Image (spheres, rainbow, N blue to C red):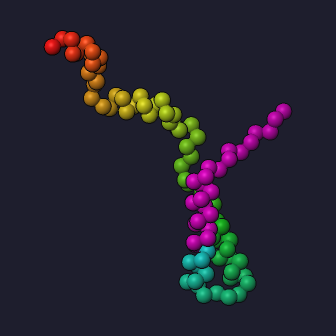
Amino acid sequence: MPRPTAPRPTVAQLAYGSCTVILSTLAMLLLSQTSSGPGVALIALVGLALGLLVAMTVPRTGRTRTTASQVVASSATATAPRRERVPVQASAQQD
């Protein structure tokens, strides 16, 4: 029986989570001015928890991803109706 696999994180989730870990940890270290080992470890754990929280709250685009044909179809209905094209030779002969 195959094991169910967990959904893979998206690029946006990885980017936002990583940036949150780095920036929040740096900010907390600078603001607290701690130099003790346990203090730095606690700040690192809090930064990691914040990064995980941010990464999990970024919306997933798994099934709601629009395809190119859906975009074309929606943009075609939003524009004004097109007039029938008349070939150049046919319009020159009508004059």
From the image, which quarter does the C terminus lie in? top left
Rendered location of residue 72, percent (x, y): 42, 31
Q: Residues in magenta?
A: 1-24
Rendered location of residue 49, percent (x, y): 64, 65
- In this picture, residue 23 sits left or right of residue 83: right
Residue 26 lies, with reference to residue 18, above or below; the image says below
Residue at 41%, 28% in the rendered image: 73
Quick one: 47 or 68, which is closer to the camera? 68
Magenta region includes residue 13: yes
Can see residue 57? Answer: yes
Q: Check the image and name the residue furthest to the left.
A: 95
**Residue 32 location, quadrant:** bottom right
Residue 77 lies, with reference to residue 87, above or below; the image says below
Quick one: 42 or 64, which is closer to the camera? 64
From the image, which quarter does the N terminus lie in? top right
Residue at 68%, 76% in the rendered image: 42
**Residue 87 location, quadrant:** top left
Residue at 68%, 88% in the rendered image: 35
- In this picture, residue 31 sits left or right of residue 44: left
Magenta region includes residue 6: yes
Rendered location of residue 43, percent (x, y): 65, 76
Rendered location of residue 66, percent (x, y): 50, 36
Can see residue 84? Answer: no
